């Protein structure tokens, strides 16, 4: 199991005439979801990955698609995969109690 869960959002600027086809390719990519912007050629996309390296790799793949003018990372958040132990209040980062 990965150590962290990464959620990122991207804005993908593309040629309007290619936007629907690019959105379809993005939807087929593992962890990608297109939320809108297809008519304008400014796609709003979220990406869920296991590592930061996966984010970079996927971003590079998007930037190389025919018709993509720019793909920009606008948000990134990660959470540890191992949640806090709710019965003791402890976590891998230490206890909150003195």
Image (cartoon, grey):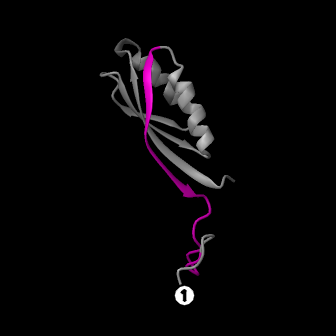
Residue 92 colored in magenta in the image: no
Q: Which residue is mark 1?
A: 98
Give the number of marks. Answer: 1
Location of residue 46 in the rendering, given as x and y in whole percent from the top left corner: 45, 39
On screen, residue 28 above or below 51: above
| Res. 30 visible in picture | no
What residue span does the magenta drawing correspond to? 67-90
Visible residue check, residue 86: yes
Q: Was residue 88 drawn as part of the magenta stretch in this picture?
A: yes
Q: Considering only vertical position in the picture, is 73 above or below 14?
A: below
Residue in view at x 50 percent, y 29 percent: 27
Q: Residue at x 60, y 75 (%)?
A: 94
Q: Secondary structure at mark 1?
A: loop
Q: Is residue 67 above or below residue 47?
A: above
Q: In the depicted view, which residue is nearer to us: 96 or 32?
A: 96
Q: Residues within 10 Å of mark 1 (few under 14, many from 20)?
A: few
| 70 lies left or right of 3 | left
Give the image location of residue 9, x and y in percent.
44, 40
Occupied quadrant, residue 67: top left
Image quarter where the C terminus lies is: bottom right
- Which residue is outermost to the top? 17
Residue 11: where, in percent of width, then height?
A: 40, 32
């Amino acid at each position: 199991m990965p150590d962290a869960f990464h959620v990122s959002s991207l804005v993908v600027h593309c040629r309007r005439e290619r936007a629907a086809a690019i959105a379809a390719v993005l939807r087929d990519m593992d962890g990608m979801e297109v939320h809108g912007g297809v008519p304008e050629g400014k796609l709003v996309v979220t990406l869920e990955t296991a590592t930061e390296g996966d984010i970079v790799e996927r971003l590079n793949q998007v930037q190389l698609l025919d018709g993509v003018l720019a793909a920009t990372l606008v948000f990134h958040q990660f959470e540890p995969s191992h949640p806090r132990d709710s019965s003791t209040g402890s976590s891998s980062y230490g206890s909150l109690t003195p």
